[in-house]
Image (tube, rainbow, N blue to C red):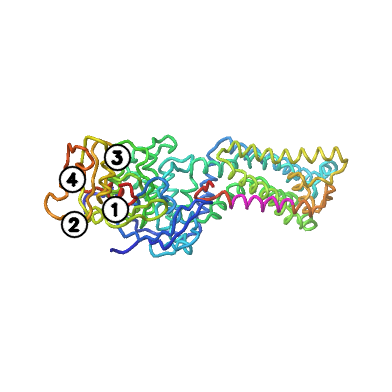
Amino acid sequence: MSPIHDQSYRRYQGARHAVGGAWGVIAWSGIRAMLAKRAYVFLLIFSWVPFIVNAVRIYLVTNFPQAGSFLGVNPQMFRSFLDSQGVFVFFMTIWAGAGLIANDRRANALQIYLSKPLLRAEYVGGKLAVLLAFLLTVTLVPGLLLLLLQVAFSGSFDFLGKNLYLIPSIILGSLVQVIVASTTMLALSSLSKSSRYAALLYTGAIFFTDAVFNALRLINGSTRMAWVSITANMAQVTDVIFRQPARYETPWLVSLLVLVALVVLSISVLERRVRGVEVVS
Amino acid sequence: MSESVVTLDRVNITYGKQRALRDVSAVFPTGAVGLLGPNGAGKSTMLKALLGFVKPDSGALNVLGLDVAKRPLEVRARLGYMPESEAQIPGMNAVSFVAYCGQLSGLPKSDAMQRAHEVLYYVGLGEARYRNIETYSTGMKQRIKLAQALVHDPDLLFLDEPTNGMDPKGRDEMLELIRDLAHNKGVNLILSSHLLPDVEYTCDHVVVMDKGTVATFGTIEALKGPSGRVFEVRVKGELPVFIAALKAAGLEASETDEDVMRVFVPGVPVGPGEDQRKISAVALSAGVQIRHLKPSLPTLEDVFARAIGEA
C-alpha cells in the first residue's frame, strides 16, 4: 500500500442500492428543506392549535359531564375539525408545494434528476410525498389522535364502538383533502418556473372557482352549481364520508367525479411537464 | 476497433417537422470519444436519446451492452451526465448537492457523502464545497456539474460542452481533468463539443456530425493521417478566384481566422515538391501571387472541415 493517500479520483467499490428507492431520497430531502425554515415550522405548530382546543373540549366533556350540555363530543365535531384544518392545508400547500417543481424547472434540475436511475413517476412521487407528509400531519394524524384522546379521557370504548366508522371517515376525509390539494398544487408548480406564479395560480384556482359558485348561488338561489367550486366539492364529499347531511344540492357523486377529474388532469399535466428535455416545436 | 460502449443503429429522431437525427448509425469505442459538429448538428439530441430523454422514431440505441429502450434505469445507473446548460438543484451547498446526486444514483448515504467530498476535491472545489451553488461562478458551476456526474463512479460519462463559459485557465484545468479521467482513471467518456482543440486534446476517437447525420468517424490520428497533405498558403490577389481554381483542380481549401489559408492536397504524393508545384500552377492560372507556402500538420480542424464539406 502506498504511504501517500491518493486524493485524486478513485473508483467506487462499495454497495449500491437497487433502483426504485430514489423517491424516498427526494421526499426526505424535501421534508428536511422545509423543516429548516423556521416560519414553516411555526405554521406547522400553529396548525395544531385546533387540535389542542378540541382535546381540551374532549377532556372537559368526559371529566365534567355538565360541560356536555354546551360542548358536545359527537361525530360532527370530528367532521368540523377537518373543516377547520382546511385553512392550514391551504397555506401549507402553497408554502411547501409551489416551489417543489417550479424551482427545479428554474434551475434546470429536471435533467439532473432524470439522468439518474429514476423514473419520472418516482420524481413526482417523491415531490408528492413531501406535500402528503406535511398535509397528513395536520389532518389525518391529529384527527386520529383526537379519537384516541376521547377513548383515553373517557376510559371507555363506548363512543368509539358506536361510531367505529369515524376511523375510516377520518382517513378517507383527510386523504380527499390532501390528495386533491397536493396533486393540483404539484401540477400548477410544473407549469411555471416561478414558485410565486404557481402559488398565485393555486390561490386563483381555489378562490376563483369558489367565487363563481357563490355568484351562481346568488343568481340562482340554489346550490346546485356547487360542483364548480373545488372547496365545495371537497366539503360535499367529506360530508358524505362522515355520514353527515350533504350541505349542497349538487349530488355528491358529481362532486366526487369533479375531484377525480381534477386529480386525473393534474397527473396528465405532470406527465407532460416532467421531462428531461423540453421540446419547443 | 476496440470494444464499443455505445452503438446506434439507424436512429431517426424528429422534433415536430425538424429531423434532428437522420438514420444515424455509429459505434463509440471504449476510451475518450469526441462528438464533434456545428451547433444544431444533433450532438445533444444524440446524448439525450442515449439517456432515454428522447424516444427515437425508429432505430436502436445500445449503451454498455444494454438496450436503452428496454432497460433505461440500468443504463442511467452506469452513466454520468454533465448537461450543457446550467443545471443544479436549488437551495443546496455543493457537498449536499453532490451527495444527494450520489444517493439518487443508488449510493448509501454515508458513501455518497464521502464520495461527494472526494470528487469535489478532485474537480477543484474542495475549498468551496460548503458554499451554496447559486453563488458559484460559471466556471465553478461547470465543475460542480462534472462532480455530480462522477459521484457514483459511472462506467461512461457524457460531457455536453464541458468548457462552455469558462475562462482560459479554467478551461485548461477542465480539459486536464477530462483527459485524466479518460487516460489515467479508466472512465469511458463521450465529449460533445464544437470546440475542436478541446476534442483533439482529450479524445482518441472522434465522431463528426453534421445536419443530423454522421459525417465521419474514426481515430483522430487515422482521420488526420495518410489521406493527404496540408499546406499553409498566403496569397496576394483575388482569394475567391484562387479558392475556386483550387477546387477545380481537385484540391480543398479553407480560410482561417488569419490571412493564412489551409490547402488540402488529397491522395498519395506523386513526388517531392509535386504538391507545391501543383498549388503554384493553380495560383498562376488564377492570377494570384503566393507570398507564403509551407507544409503543415493536418489538424482536427481539417478533418472537420472536410467531413462537413466546408473545405
Q: Nearer the viewer, mark 2 or mark 3?
A: 3
Q: Are marks 4 and 1 in contact (CB under 8 Å)?
A: no
Callout 3 environment at 10 Å: few (<14), some (14 to 19), or many (20+)? few
In this rendering, position of residue A42 left or right of residue B186: right
In this rendering, position of residue B78 left or right of residue A210: left
Q: Which residue is mark 2?
A: B268
In percent of width and height, residue B185 lies at: 28, 54
Upstream in the sequence, badge 2 or badge 1?
A: 1
Q: Residue B182's mark?
A: 1
Position of the N terminus of chain B, as image quadrant, is bottom left
Instruction: Give the residue at the far right of this rendering.
Output: A221
Q: Which residue is mark 3?
A: B240
Residue A1 in view here: no
Upstream in the sequence, badge 1 or badge 3?
A: 1
Q: Nearer the viewer, mark 4 or mark 2?
A: 4
- Mark 4–mark 1 Cα distance, whole angstroms, equals 46 Å
Instruction: Give the residue at the far left of this rendering.
Output: B272
Res B134 → quadrant: top left
Residue B186 in view here: yes
Element at label 3: helix
Span of residues in magenta: A258-271
Q: Are marks 1 and 3 in contact (CB under 8 Å)?
A: no
Element at label 2: loop
Q: Label 4 lies in what chain?
A: B
Q: Which residue is mark 4?
A: B281
Q: Are marks 4 and 1 on the same chain?
A: yes
Q: Are marks 2 and 1 in contact (CB under 8 Å)?
A: no
Q: Label 3 lies in what chain?
A: B
Q: Are marks 4 and 2 on the same chain?
A: yes
Q: Nearer the viewer, residue A97 or A33?
A: A97
Residue positioned 48% across, 53% down in the render? B19
